[in-house]
Image (cartoon, rainbow, N blue to C red):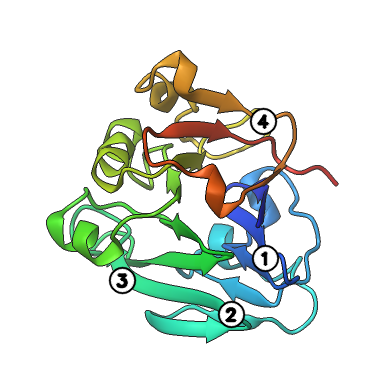
Amino acid sequence: MKITWLGHSSFKLEESTGTTLVTDPYHDYVGYEMIDVEPDILTISHAHKDHNCMDHIKGNPTVINRSGFYEMDGVHILGLKSYHDETKGTQRGENLIFKVRMDGVDVIHMGDIGEECNAMLYEALGACNILMIPVGGVYTIDAEQAKEYVDRLMPDIVIPMHYKTKDCDFNIDKLNDFLDCFDEENIIYAENSTIEFDRADFDGEETKVLVLEKVSK
């Protein structure tokens, strides 16, 4: 499978069969423009414009914006309810976490998770190979809280998202605080926006942090 970072919390996942899934498309007010994509499946974690904007979504994808179990063309998806804040949604509402199984690889996209890691979430999500998690704080969990999720879920790869970049207009934290939680030898800086994974790539021995470049137009 291939993963491309489209920016902010949006990724494109491509199965070897050609089926594509895009997460959380964003509005240009984030500070940069999302590229046009035409996925087969679109997952939306919550109804905020930096996660549910359809301006750059082409075609007629199957939109998944509710909790439950889904299957499409061999791709299995679990949507799990959580909260966008630490007060059970009273400030920013609910959030959906999606666990996607594609080409035998388990990927968890945490959306705009705002609540701390707890036993119920941990047990419901289970193990994963790749964890996509917000680290910018303010509107989501921060670097330290994200590290707690990493320690509990123990993914092979963690991909940080929803953090301050040079083009992002949001008042959120930069990536440095999260990277400081890991040994330097466990941080991988990708040379581009797309990386390919195979089920055999994961040995379960330790977690690596993968920093992707945002795809350019």
Q: Which residue is mark 3?
A: 81
As measured in the structure, the alpha-carbon distance from the residue carrying label 4 to the one carrying label 1 is 20 Å
SS at badge 3 = strand
Tag 2 secondary structure:
loop
When the figure is inspected, residue 204 is found, relative to residue 121, above or below; the finding is above
Does residue 31 appear left or right of residue 78 in this picture?
right
Q: CA distance from mark 2 to mark 1?
A: 9 Å
- Measured as percent of width and height from the top left, residue 161 is found at 51, 43
Residue flagged by tag 1: what amino acid is it?
Glu
In this orientation, does residue 199 appear? yes
Instruction: Determine whether label 1 and label 3 are within 8 Å by CB.
Output: no
Mark sitting earlier along the chain (2/1): 1
Q: Is residue 134 left or right of residue 211?
A: left
Q: Is residue 85 left or right of residue 175?
A: left
Tag 2 residue: 74
Q: Earlier in the sequence, mark 1 or mark 3?
A: 1
Point 43% across, 41% down: residue:
203
Q: CA distance from mark 2 to mark 4?
A: 28 Å
Q: Earlier in the sequence, mark 2 or mark 4?
A: 2
From the viewer's side, name the closer residue of 12 and 52. 12
**Mark 3 vs 2: CB contact within 8 A:** no
Q: Residues within 10 Å of mark 3 (few under 14, many from 20)?
A: some
**Amino acid type, callout 4:** Ala
Callout 2 touching callout 1 (CB < 8 Å):
yes
Q: Quadrant of residue 16?
A: bottom right
Mark 1 sits on what residue? 15
> Looking at the picture, which amino acid does disc 3 mark?
Lys
Residue at numbered disc 4: 190
